[in-house]
Image (cartoon, rainbow, N blue to C red):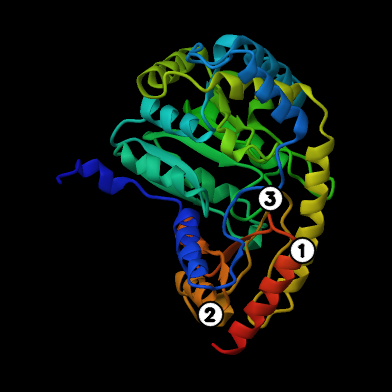
Amino acid sequence: MKFAKRMSLLGTETAFEVMAKAKALEAQGKDMIYLQIGEPDFPTPKHIIEAGVAALRGGQTHYCASSGILPLKEAIVKEVVSRRGVAPSLHNIVVTPGAKPILFFVILAMIEAGDEVIYPDPGFPIYESMISFVGAKAVPLPLREQNDFSFDHNEFCSLINERTRLIILNSPHNPTGGVLSKSDVELVAKVAKENNIMVLTDEVYKNILFDDCVHHSVYSLPDMKQRTILLDGFSKTYAMTGWRLGYGVMPSELASKVERLMVNSNSCTATFTQYAGVAALQGQMKEADAMVETFRQRRDFIVAGLNKLPGISCVMPKGAFYVFPNVSELGMKSNALENYFLHEASVALLSGSAFGKYGEGYLRLSYANSIDNIDRALQRMQTAIENI
């Protein structure tokens, strides 16, 4: 079969590939521990499930508006005002099956071959994948450990030129758990306004913060509403990964283009899922807050454990549910270590290089797993390291 050449430009998410390998080993009798996937290991809160079931039983099983149902868009407006202090209109919002389509559609709608897009590296691999898919130049913005996994301001400014069309931000950050400071987002806003550049801010982890850390959104800054695409979703905060529900807030002229891409691809997002989203935004946060506290306890445990392992050091992440330990002293490439721990320790984790070239020398572990399993994984890793 002959495929379009552009398919060779698409990357993937290594987490799903590693999971498939781990499942195959498990089928052979291996006792696997899964620390590779970015998925909360908690059930969706009951009031959200009940809202989804009630919508199904109430007949909400048909097509709806491609940009989303009115009750959810109204709830999103209130959420954005509450969290960012800026009020979008209903015409600024597009609801999609998961947050990832917003990234996909915005880049398809805005970016031409030859344009440049700045994205965080290490970072969510779909950023680079989609930029390359449309024939644009993916320009990595290095996030280094010595900068607490933020970016160097002078280095960022040096990447800007007349071809720069979009800047992608992600905070709290996958894979490092880093969080952008107020001065970071203020600089991005200043540069974007001075150079007529759009900013896409991926804020799906905004509610998973630790140690009184504050989330700063570029969308909140003066004169940035018309220059920002706010990407958010329900998967992480509400443990709704399988519900596939996300949204984008953007200038209305871009929203109309994204809505047209929805018409041509998905028609609409499942109606009953959207009613579950209304319940999520309007309901109590008891389960979500408890989940974040559990993540904090696991974070503290896994960071302490990793720092006791020979050849590994790990800084304390401020948000999300990942650690990004430095493994350069072990003397193996990140992808080789990923494979080594998978086969020799029965621990599924990810190579830092799966998130970009600046992730080499690191691993990403998700602590969306129990402390008992994390403890077992650390013990296995120690034994495996001693045998290198």
In 3D space, how far apart are the residues under numbered discs 2 and 3 (Cα atoms)?
25 Å
x 31%, y 30%: residue: 112
- Residue 218 vs 178, above or below: the answer is above
Residue 336 screen position, x and y as percent = 45, 74
Label 3 crowd bin: few (<14), some (14–19), many (20+), radius 10 Å: few
Residue type at the position of mark 2: Glu
Residue type at the position of mark 1: Ile
16 left or right of 37?
left
Quarter holding residue 265? top left
Residue 300 screen position, x and y as percent = 80, 62
Q: Which mark is residue 344?
A: 2
Residue 43 screen position, x and y as percent = 71, 42
Residue receiving disc 1: 371
x 63%, y 15%: residue: 73
Instruction: Return the residue found at the far left.
Output: 2
First in sequence: mark 2 vs mark 3? 3
First in sequence: mark 1 vs mark 3? 3
